[in-house]
Image (cartoon, grey):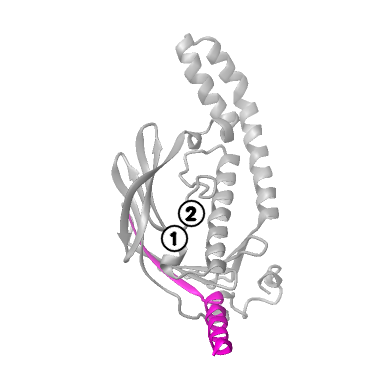
Amino acid sequence: MKCYLTAIVLLSLSQYAVADATLIYSQSQTGSKPASFTFLIKDQRLRINESSSERINLFKQSGSEFLSYNPQNQQLDLMNPEILKARVEKLDQQRQQRIKQVETELQKKLAQMSEKEREVGEALLNQIKYPAFYGEHTQIRVLPLKDHKTVAGIECRVYQLIKQKQRIKELCMAPADALGLGPKDHQTLRSFYAFDYSMLSQLMLAMGKSDFTVIDYDAQQMPGVVIEAIEFDQQQISQHTKLTSFNTEPLQAEQLRLPENRPDNDPEKATDE
């Protein structure tokens, strides 16, 4: 009897370990048509389908690689740490060149300002020169609330993003096991969160822009899965994204791959192996 029980336990654990996941989100945004996003997770891969686009977006946890394929013109865009580093360096060089062209003139204007005006002007100049240290994103504070909400039948914890005493974003996070996500699928999703933050924040800062609201969930100690995200503009909801349904039914491996009928001379075709 003990052997049979052991076999049943091992079988159930094996099935749980390879469980796949499908998460469907709805999104409403001021001035835009409603949209939906479907996340398919399997074998350390995440595919994101958008209702308003035919693009195939694929994140591969191994190598932190993101591919976006347009089947209409067969164009493939690729992003990975090496490509990101090169783009950030190029954008940063361009930004530094623009700063050099205007910095001398700005310094002259600062010298003619009152002390109070000069403090404001120097703060703005620092934002332009050193956005990573003085940018608007550094003013964001994450406030974990005791409040819990229920979205799509899942209880989640509320976190508010505060900037200059104003609520700019609200996130609701739920434990992975509440959605039936296994450890591997959960890690794939968290890896995508980290990749998305790293890519967007680095590119924006390299361009001298720091008014973004993406955050590092790990650094902010926000565990789990994003169930709901609400963005505010002057305390009015400007964008609302929330989970509408989910399941852990098996997915086909082909669903997590790019089409095989891409051009043979596609330089990135080998990356989908």
Can residue 139 be found in the magenta stretch? no
The residue sitting at 46% across, 14% down in the picture is 117
Which of disc 2 and disc 1 is earlier in sequence? 1
- Residue 52, visible in the rendered structure: no
Secondary element type, mark 2:
loop
Quadrant in which the N terminus is drawn: bottom right
Question: Residue 170 appears at what percent x and percent y?
Answer: 37, 48
Q: Nearer the viewer, residue 164 or 204?
A: 164
Q: Which residues are magenta?
A: 1-29
Quadrant in which the C terminus is drawn: bottom right
Of the numbered discs in the image, which one, if any, rests on residue 175? Answer: 1
Question: Residue 167 appears at what percent x and percent y?
Answer: 35, 40
Q: Nearer the viewer, residue 145 or 201?
A: 145
Q: Nearer the viewer, residue 222 or 264?
A: 222
Mark 1 in CB contact with mark 2 (< 8 angstroms): yes
Q: Amino acid at mark 2?
A: Pro
Q: Nearer the viewer, residue 77 or 18?
A: 18
